[in-house]
Amino acid sequence: MLIRALAPSDSPLLAALHAAAFPPGEAWGQDAFARLVALPGAVGVVAADGGVPVGFVLARRAADEAEILALAVVPEWRRRGVGRALLAACLEGLAGQGVGRVFLEVAADNTGARALYRAAGFVPAGLRRDYYGVGRDGLLLVRLLSPPCAG
């Protein structure tokens, strides 16, 4: 598996991977990703196997903090270490840029993602009731990168 840095031209790819990874109605479109990738401090990585993209993580850095905006792995590649590798590469890159704290939000009912983030050292920092609508709460998680993480 090859992991490479995101490029500004990756918006269509990110939208396609996000659509493959999330239920209809929850996927973000190409325009949304174009705006996110163009934000100041936007960083991320894409994973591919044999040249076929299988996942990505997109974050935004501001001063010494960052927020993971999206992490997606296509279903047939889940539970193979792709998400863990993407997250480790992103955290390592952020730590190298002087980021000391990383935040993310995850649906409280997304047990797979919560387990991934817990294994990566993220801890609860807050709860947002009905954040995802229809009674789906959002958990705010945080991970300290000081000293810089080893992944």
Image (cartoon, rainbow, N blue to C red):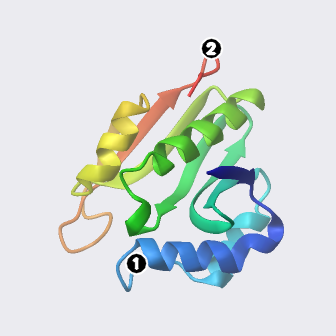
Using residue 90 as the reference point, say whether residue 129 is left or right of it: left
Say the numbered circle drawn on residue 113: none
Q: Residue furthest front?
A: 50
Q: Residue 66: which quarter of the image? A: top right
Kindly identify the amino acid type of the residue bearing the numbered disc 1. Answer: Glu
Q: Is residue 80 above or below residue 21?
A: above
Judging from the image, what secondary structure is the residue with disc 2 in? Answer: loop
Q: Position of residue 53 (x, y in %)?
A: 62, 67
Say the numbered circle drawn on residue 26: 1
Instruction: Say which of 2 and 58 sits in front.
Output: 2
Q: How many neighbours does mark 1 have within 10 angstroms: few (below 14), some (14-19), or many (20 or more)?
A: few
Residue 123 shows in the view: no
Q: Residue 121: which quarter of the image? A: top left
Residue 83 shows in the view: yes
Q: Position of residue 75 (x, y in %)?
A: 38, 67
Residue highlighted by disc 2: 147
**How far apart are labels 2 and 1 at the CA level?**
35 Å
Q: Position of residue 36 (x, y in %)?
A: 68, 67
Kindly identify the amino acid type of the residue bearing the numbered disc 2. Answer: Pro
What residue is drawn where x is 39% and y is 40%?
Answer: 117
Q: Residue furthest left?
A: 135
Q: Is residue 92 above or below residue 4?
A: above
Q: Is residue 124 above or below residue 28?
A: above
Q: Position of residue 20 (x, y in %)?
A: 46, 77
What residue is drawn where x is 57% and y is 36%?
Answer: 88
